[in-house]
Amino acid sequence: NAGVTQTPKFRVLKTGQSMTLLCAQDMNHEYMYWYRQDPGMGLRLIHYSVGEGTTAKGEVPDGYNVSRLKKQNFLLGLESAAPSQTSVYFCASSYWGQENTGELFFGEGSRLTVL
Amino acid sequence: QQQVKQSPQSLIVQKGGISIINCAYENTAFDYFPWYQQFPGKGPALLIAIRPDVSEKKEGRFTISFNKSAKQFSLHIMDSQPGDSATYFCAASSAGNNRKLIWGLGTSLAVNP
């Protein structure tokens, strides 16, 4: 059972380049999320999806785009990378049960450096 | 505006001691409060969670204490072990906010052998 898989795990970009991070989950979860994690700033939500074909903005969406064409995949795109986007990116998927209880399952992260 | 405030930012505890991490929230609509544990190089993983209809939940050495009137909740790690060294995040959620978790900034715990 793979859970949540992120690719690539590491990437170095030059300013202005574009790239796509892929997140795949095999748990049939409706909800998927993209976070970035920076030292001292916790986990900040970039975009999320509540089901196939839907996306919504989180706290820090600027400079990123997402797509959820298939239920199991959630793609995060950087159209024109900037040094401020150097970070560790985490994808998560979740179920939510009765009484608003649930669990987020995270991937192992993608470390992106923008020079 | 940070809706979940977590303290301390870092914590050093001796093996066998008690680790205590505190969180305070502002939104009274929150009705689900999980704690996540993150080891270096890994994604966070759910450790324990509580709903506001109970004041305490215990799972092994980990206990959440919840004070609804004070809008505070805390994680207690009894008999702390070096393997507990990790970053701990508290979070909160309500059904009304599309089930997004609002996160604290994290506490880096080091347990000395």
Image: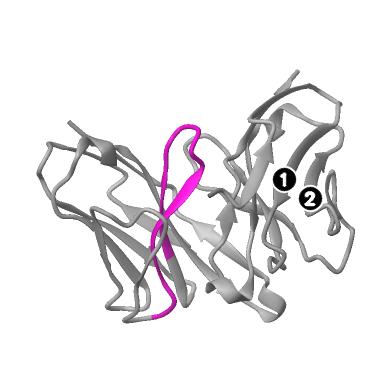
Q: Which residues are magenta?
A: A33-51
Residue A47: image location, x then y, percent: 37, 62
Q: Which element is circle 1 on?
A: strand
Whether pointer 1 and pointer 2 mark residues with C-beta atoms closer than 8 Å, the reply is yes
**Residue most extreme to the right:** B55
Which of the marked residues, 1 or 2, is nearer the chain's N terminus?
Answer: 1
- From the image, give the main secondary structure of the stretch colored magenta: strand
Q: Which residue corresponds to the image point at 72% horizontal and 48% vertical from the top-left? A: B24
Q: Residue furthest left?
A: A16
Viewer-nearest residue: A1 or B38: B38
- Left/right of residue B35 with respect to residue A56 in the rendered view: right
Decide if residue A4 is on the left or right side of residue B87. left
- Residue A49, position as x, y percentages in the image: 40, 72
Which chain does the residue under circle 1 lie in?
B
Residue at the spot x=69%, y=31% of the render?
Answer: B8
Q: Tell me if residue A17 is in the magenta stretch.
A: no
Q: At label 2, which amino acid type do we have?
A: Gln
